[in-house]
Every structure is written in C-alpha cells, then in structure tokens.
Image (spheres, grey):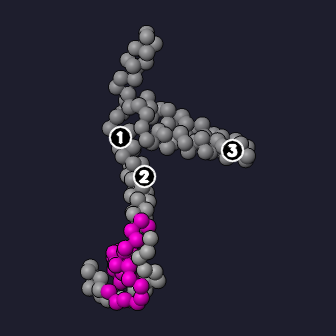
Amino acid sequence: MNFRWRLIRFMSGRYGADTLFFVMFAFSAALAFINIFIRSIILQAVVYTVMLIAVLRVFSRNIPARSRENEAIMGIINRFNGRAETVRKRKADYTHIYKKCPHCRAVLRLPRKKGKHTTVCPRCGKSFTVRVFKDYKR
C-alpha cells in the first residue's frame, strides 16, 4: 500500500500515458521486431530513442505541450478512421452507388439502376454520364 501511495504521489501533476505513447511504443516494438532480422546498430539506436521519448512524455509536467502533440496524432488517426468508416458504409449501401463528379470531384450518391444514365452535379451544375452494371439484389 505504501508503494502504491508513493507512485500516485509521484505521478500527480505528470502527463501520463496517452494515445501517442501507445503509438510510439508500438512503432518502436515493430522496429525492434524488424531489427531481429536486419541486426543494425543504427536501427537499434532508433528503437531505444523512440522508447525513451515515449517514456519521457509519460513523466513530463508540461501538460499543454503533450496535449497538443496528442491532439495532432489523434487528428491523423481520426481522419484515417473516418475514411475507413465511410468506405464501410458505402459498401454496405446496396441501393445506391457513389460516383465522383469529373469536373469538381464532389461525391454523388446515386440510385443503383442498371444502365447508362446522365446526371447533373448539384455542386457545379455540369452533367455527366454514369454507367451502373448491377441492380440492387441482396
């Protein structure tokens, strides 16, 4: 109990582990695994450096700076997750197809009807043809 209390007291006012810590630690673990086969001193130094920076971030008292760093990496992760979720939703939508306007690159959600159709982009107002190969069938 005494050790736990001392650890809590030591960590109070420090930043702690966050998403960037886990990303950096996973990255260094992946580099360490690659280094098993390559056996490079330089790569090993990079592994130790990344791990050291990750651990030093945990014990840092500069909370606003660490929060900004974590928000930057979370923006990248959320952007990637958002795109993956969009692709997942589009694949699950059997009644519509998604096409980009060749003029303004806007993504249009069009009904899935087999054949060749002409559509007008609501953003730029130009028309283009869309070809649908399959009808809606589950």
Q: Distance of mark 3 from mark 2, alpha carbons? A: 26 Å
Relative image position of residue 109 (x, y in whole percent): 33, 75
For the point 38% across and 31% down, the residue is 15
Q: Which residue is mark 3?
A: 35
The image quadrant that residue 90 belongs to is: bottom left
Q: Which numbered circle lies on residue 67?
A: 1
Question: Is 108 a magenta residue?
Answer: yes
Q: Relative to 83, is 12 above or below?
A: above
Q: Nearer the viewer, residue 11 or 136?
A: 136
Sequence-wise, the earlier of marks 1 and 3 is 3
Callout 3: few (<14), some (14-19), or many (20+) C-alpha neighbours within 10 Å? Answer: some
User: What is the magenta range?
Assistant: 91-119
Q: Which residue is mark 2?
A: 77
For the point 38% across and 83% down, the residue is 113
Secondary element type, mark 3:
helix
Callout 2: few (<14), some (14-19), or many (20+) C-alpha neighbours within 10 Å? Answer: few
Amino acid type, residue under disc 1 in the picture = Ser
Sequence-wise, the earlier of marks 3 and 2 is 3
Q: Distance of mark 1 from mark 3, alpha carbons? A: 31 Å
Secondary element type, mark 2:
helix
Question: Is 71 a magenta residue?
Answer: no
Left or right of residue 50: residue 32: right
* Pointers 1 and 3 in contact (C-beta within 8 Å): no
Q: Nearer the viewer, residue 40 or 34?
A: 34
Q: Relative to 28, is 129 above or below?
A: below
For the point 42% across and 48% down, the residue is 73
Secondary element type, mark 1:
helix
Residue 105 at least partly seen: no
Q: Nearer the viewer, mark 2 or mark 1?
A: 2
